Image (spheres, helix red, strand yellow):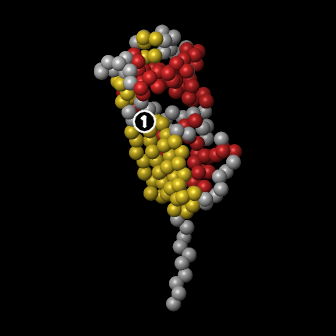
Amino acid sequence: MILQSIAPPPNDFDFVHARWLLHHLSQPEHAIRRMIDALRPGGWLLLEENDFFPFYTSTSQLYIDFMITFVENVVRPAGGNAYLGRALPAMLAEMGLQRVSGEGAFAVLQGGSPVAEFYSLSAEQIRERIIESGELTAHSGDCDQPFRPKVITDSGDRDHASTPSIVSARGCRRSAPSTRVQVA
């Protein structure tokens, strides 16, 4: 990854944007610092990252258990942070950016929808790692297929679950001091 091995040119960009990148890194602060260094004075940094807290509101305990198992046995061992989004505004402020702000949003997926199918297929891809953890079995509870919770696969109007949130944080690099010379 370029941000971990090669620094972008310093003071070269008016705008730097990263989406769904930092939560995969074991040291996201290092990448953020490089992005800030690449900004020109007055340039803006926009970061968009996941935060998995909304899944705790699901009505399906299996979905909650699956997401917790996913975070603990797939994301965290790979060096990732599934709860990074909420920390971004404070990180940007601590790194000296000005006019820092943030906002978040999450979707409520309905069973059987295209988004639900995406989550279901994602669950299938990590199925073996989850089973190997021993925390869930191949045929846990409320499933119509192994590791496809009904809240994800059903098409009924009553089956809903929260997706991870997306947190956007932005800040402006401090402008260079004015070097205007007054002419009399």
Residue 28 appears anywhere in the view: yes
Q: Residue at x 61, y 37 (%)?
A: 26
Identified by mark 1, the residue type is Ser
Farthest bottom residue in view:
184
> Does any portion of residue 55 appear in the rendered image?
no
Q: Nearer the viewer, residue 184 or 112?
A: 112
Q: Residue at x 56, y 39 (%)?
A: 21
Q: Residue at x 65, y 52 (%)?
A: 8
* Quadrant of the snapshot with the N terminus: top right
| Residue density around tag 1, few if under 14, some if 14–19, many if 20 or more, within 10 Å | many
Residue located farthest toward the front when viewing the structure as drawn: 114
Measuring from the top left, give residue 71's x and y in whole percent. 52, 27
Q: Quadrant of residue 62?
A: top left
Image point (42%, 30%), residue name? 163
Farthest residue in the right direction? 5
Q: Residue 164: name its quadrant.
A: top left
Give the secondary structure at mark 1: strand
Circle 1 is placed at which residue position?
A: 165
Residue at the farthest left position: 157
Q: How many marks?
A: 1
Relative to residue 180, is residue 10 depicted above or below? Answer: above
Give the x, y percent position of residue 108. 36, 30
Q: Position of residue 120 (x, y in %)?
A: 46, 21
Task: Check the image and report above or below for 114 versus 33.
Answer: above
Question: From the viewer's perspective, is 144 left or right of 78?
Answer: left
Of residues 39 and 86, the one nearer the viewer is: 39
Residue 76 spot, x, y in % from top left: 57, 29
